Image (spheres, coloured by chain):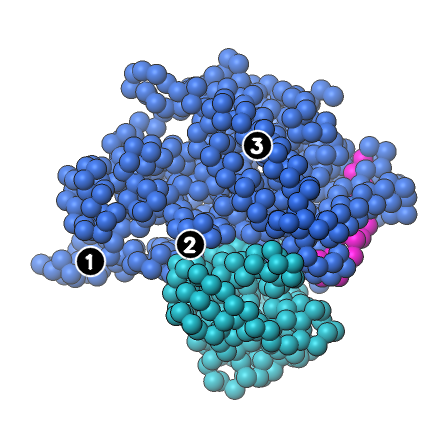
Amino acid sequence: MALDSRVPKGPIKDKWTDYKNKIDLVNPANKRHIDIIVVGTGLAGGSAAATLAELGYNVKAFAYQDSPRRAHSIAAQGGINAAKNYQGDGDSTYRLFYDTVKGGDYRSREANVYRLAEVSTNIIDQCVAQGVPFARDYGGLLDNRSFGGVLVSRTFYAKGQTGQQLLLGAYSAMNRQIARGKIEMFNRHEMLDVVKVDGKARGIIARNLITGEVERHSAHAVVVATGGYGNVYFLSTNAMGSNVTAAWKIHKKGAYFANPCYTQIHPTCIPRSGDYQSKLTLMSESLRNDGRIWVPKSLDDVKAIREGSKKPTDLSEDERDYYLERRYPAFGNLVPRDVASRAAKERCDAGYGVNATGEAVYLDFAAAIERYGKEQAKIQNISNASDAKIYELGQAIVEAKYGNLFQMYEKIVDQNPYKTPMMIYPAVHYTMGGVWVDYNLMTTVPGLYCIGEANFSDHGANRLGASALMQGLADGYFVLPYTIGDYLSDDIRTGKISTDTKEFEEAEKEVKAKIDFFVTNKGTKSVDYFHKKLGKVMWDKCGMSRNEKGLKEAMVEIKAIREEFWKEVSVPGSASEMNPELEKAGRVADFLELGELFAKDALTRNESCGGHFREESAEESGPQKGEAKRNDKDYAFVSAWEYKGEPADAVLHKEELEFKDIELKQRSYK
Amino acid sequence: MNLTLKIWRQKDSNAKGQMVDYKVTDISEHMSFLEMMDVLNEQLVNSGEEPVAFDHDCREGICGMCSMYINGEAHGPDRGITTCQLHMRMFKDGDTITIEPFRAAAFPVIKDLVVDRTSFERIQQAGGYISVNTSGNTQDANSIPISKHAADEAMDAATCIGCGACVATCKNSSAMLFVGAKVSQYALLPQGQVEAADRVQNMVAQMDLEGFGNCTNTGACEVECPKGISLDNIARMNRELMKATIK
């Protein structure tokens, strides 16, 4: 099947408006005869469910937690971008579009990104109207901060809990529709397969996680909004339950999976401390507005710090290497995430890591505290303020900005970050890759849509900070509700879809067979054993830098782990009850297939772009020596993989990327 | 460190539950409490026993899923945190730790430490929203200035994670801190004024219907709340309710 991105013709700035004007609509009286299933209730799924219900469709929404409000969008800290230009610093739709395409290392689809930038301003209006308490200045207007990879302040925020507040906004909109009976909410349910009838997505098979019952649900269209697959690494900043299952099941039923190797390794996470660890914790990128990243200049100091004979605060300014400021004077500590992560790895690989594991760098707020303190002293007319007073005044400002993050750090690490620099290290955070979708956000299966982090479309090979929330809400509030109407306009006379058909029966049988296998297979090893083993291969060979040899080994090793898994996995308990181990087993089974496709995709893409760094493709000389080297001649395409049984047999389809409105350049942040 | 755990085990909502003793060894003080539970569960799975079911997800104190009652306190002995942020350095070698589910009539046990908190959902559905369509044709976000003070106070109320620690802690199993926080967030913002009277009445009515108790101002909820939601929110809710009733 040839890939058709269905991007409308015309100049980029008019595409979306013209397209919306000409799109087929479903009249309000007919909408109430149409059912839509939305799987996942984070920012994308929650906002889509609410808006579709508002429009009049009957929505069935599914979440594996006990409430939509618990989806992992809630953990997003820093903020949401929008081209409002409230600061008058030169922002515009074009600039947000440009920054996003450049930040994504020219591997995203121009038309989708432009649309995203275009609707970004609506999101802020919408959220304020819903009662989202964004930060404000003393005049009562909205405040902004700055994020990595851009030269303007366009990020709106609600303390360090922006994701929480936006999700609660979408959740409140859902609640209004649940109360009206337009959304039927299925909490503690997990989608285990999609059902296709005559080639179209017409329903899902879901398991009730309380009773264990396997249920059939039908609809005229299915929307998958189930987030990213970062947990393929076992350790990531994702929630424990975040998984690829829904996305992978639809892949196996015909939806192409795009760019699985594009993973974001976030530079500012709390370093790991031991093998028992179950997950990693992110410290918001917003900290890089005020924090300066450094390691000691001399290896002797590194040694002394690791042994505890020196403290980081003992080192004078000229004994410190602020390596981001040194290497990237223009963007300094606010370079994009992939660049900051690789730079940290480079220093730590060279032996400059500052903790026992050798995998940590400092994020220091002393300069910011002093700067704010002096500013406050001036504002409050305190002359000859003592150092202690300046520190106290400065600390209050830093606390107001990042208080909850500092508290979180102190609880985990047991050190006071106001007094000693934080230690940070990169960790898996977000996956830019995902299910391939066209301009309408429809997958290669008719009637099957994919939105939010679960799809691949807007961030190319690297996502900029504060853009995930923007994309999730853009897809759910402002894009999908229009585009899905175009498809459903053909379905106004279809009538209710029966679940009493052979297609549903077969899908249900297959799901039940897999569940029965898990609970009857008396293996010798726990699900986590395999998940950890997979995670290690992924981190070592498909992590921050990748090479041909490692990727080939990874494919072989992951396949071997998968084979062992199907022989030796042990799941206690039964299928007809709440059984968290059984849930995990199904998810890890899918990760074990995705992992291999991931490595295959990384192997195929022999260029460095964004979060995907191939050691074979780095600049060899000149001022950019060691930086990622993109290859536009051979790799300016989206890799969309078609399922053919074994992941190694997946077939590559290319969507060539055209850049008509942006000139392709090396992404320099120097 | 080596620990004895006394954990509530209950097969399902209809079964009778009981406390069961477990031993865990070599627990690092740097582990989080839930990582310690992961170690216990791995141990149980490897010996063919059923692991302890407990709710958890984000493991960074924001999703509100984790809900254990540890040594007689919701989210355990530390302050301003959820169970997933509790660290083993709060305990010492040889300790016996009692772990129960959040208990309240409106939070029935589903299994082991997992409880059903959908009563909170129904309270929110009764009015925890502003009736504005998500069409995007709203007015510009800066068209209504909101004083920084009001916005910050609304934010403080809005940080509630809906975990239910307030209910589990309250001797009356009252949900007033939770409902008060939601009512306050909207009451403090101009956008929420239009339906303020209906909102508070509907939410309070649903709260009573769900079987939550009344508030007798002991303030225990505020102490145990992982997000430091203030008792002021209960006062504000009562004021809003009064205002709505005498209108």
Which chain gets the blue colouring? A
Q: Kindly identify the amino acid type of the residue bearing the numbered disc 1.
A: Tyr
Q: Indicate the position of residue B128 as horizontal and vertical percent values.
A: 60, 65
Q: Relative to residue A4, is residue B183 depicted above or below?
A: below
Quarter assignment of residue A25: top right
The answer for which chain carries disc 2 is: A
Q: Main secondary structure of the magenta part?
A: strand
- Compare residues A446 and A634 and report the one nearer the observer: A634
Residue picked out by circle 1? A391
Going from the N terminus, do you reach mark 1 or mark 3 first? 1
Q: Quadrant of the N terminus of chain A?
A: top right
Label 2, label 1: how far apart the Cα atoms are: 22 Å
Do the numbered discs 1 and 3 sit on residues whose CB atoms are within 8 Å?
Answer: no
Q: Quadrant of the C terminus of chain A?
A: top left
Classed neighbour count for the residue bearing mark 3: other residues with Cα under 10 Å, few (<14), some (14–19), many (≥20):
some
In the orientation shown, which residue stands out farthest toward the bottom? B216
- Tell me the residue at 66%/45% (across/down): A568
Do the numbered discs 2 and 1 sit on residues whose CB atoms are within 8 Å?
Answer: no
In the orientation shown, which residue stands out farthest toward the left? A384
Q: Indicate the position of residue A191 as horizontal and vertical percent values.
A: 72, 48
Q: Relative to residue A210, is residue B143 depicted above or below?
A: above
For label 3, the SS is helix
Q: Relative to residue A579, is residue A449 depicted above or below?
A: above
Residue picked out by circle 2? A160
Instruction: Tell me if I can see residue A169 in this picture.
Output: no
Which chain gets the cyan colouring? B
Tag 1 and tag 3 share a subunit: yes
Specify start and end residues of the magenta stretch as a single range.
Answer: A200-216
- Give me the disc on residue A557: 3
Classed neighbour count for the residue bearing mark 2: other residues with Cα under 10 Å, few (<14), some (14–19), many (≥20):
many
